[in-house]
Amino acid sequence: MKKKKHIPLHIDIITVLPKLIESPFEHSIVKRAIDKKLVKVNIINLRDYASDKYKHVDDYMYGGGAGMVMMIEPIAKCIEALKKKRTYDEIIYMSPDGELFDQKMANNISLLKNFIILCGHYKGVDERVREHFITKEISIGDYVLSGGELAAAVVCDAVIRLIPGVISDETSALTDSFQDGLISPPAYTRPADFKGMKVPDILLSGNTKNIEEWRHEKSLERTEKRRPDLFKDTSPR
Ligand code: SAH
């Protein structure tokens, strides 16, 4: 039977610090996904779209106040140039006041064909960028980072590992925490006895059915104890 071909996901990341975002794509599962051509990640230096010879991409805030704001002009130029090449499913801005990122959102984004991620810096971007170019705003948590790069890397990592074929054991990503609304059960590897610290007998029994049941029980127990809020979330995953 012919294997169904996955159309690669195309991600464009716009940043003023390309070096900061390169490394997360050069290791482990994410790198393998890129090597297997299941995803294409294109890092764009916003300064290439600056209008002046000093490559300025930020300026003082109207109305006064500390901190620089990223200007609309280079961002607009950059996004418009990208849009000439393809139609984007989403143009995402990383922002602490965006929609909170979670596994459900990662699943939804992994189904897209392509998207842009704009990384903010300084005080963030001119509000008009958000109003006229951005289709989705994502926060990775209620804290403020100095730039959107680390947040973008978090989103891309969580999304890329969900693409079919990226993780060799197909079921592996599906059994991770949150994927089925539960926390993962505990995992063990050799040795079975480390200085008296033992692996639960059932995992050594070879009885797959009992092991599955035990794992499910542990998942429920852990979710109850650590994240009871997950039981209340009834939205489809
Ligand atoms: N003045 C802004 C913060 C700017 S922080 C405010 O108070 O909302 C600089 C940039 O870092 C932001 O533009 C955003 O791209 C990124 N950033 C900071 N915290 C983030 C978070 N929790 N999630 C996603 N992006 C974040």
Image: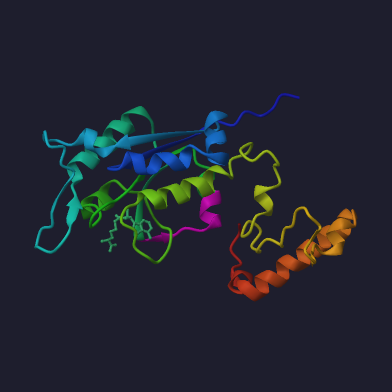
Instruction: Identify which residue is drawn at 16% across, 37% down.
Output: 55
Quarter holding residue 142: bottom left
Quadrant of the image for the N terminus?
Answer: top right
Q: Is residue 116 visible?
A: no
Q: Is residue 32 visible?
A: yes
Above or below 107: residue 142: below
Question: Residue 22 in the image: x percent, y percent?
Answer: 40, 39
Question: Residue 205 in the image: x percent, y percent?
Answer: 90, 57
Residue, far left: 63
Q: Is residue 99 magenta?
A: yes
90 vs 164, nearest the viewer: 164
In the picture provided, is 182 more to the left or to the right than 35?
right
Quarter holding residue 232: bottom right
What's the magenta region?
97-107
Q: Is residue 78 magenta?
A: no
Instruction: Identify which residue is drawn at 32% across, 33% down.
Output: 82
Instruction: Identify which residue is drawn at 52% across, 32% down.
Output: 34
Quarter holding residue 164: top right
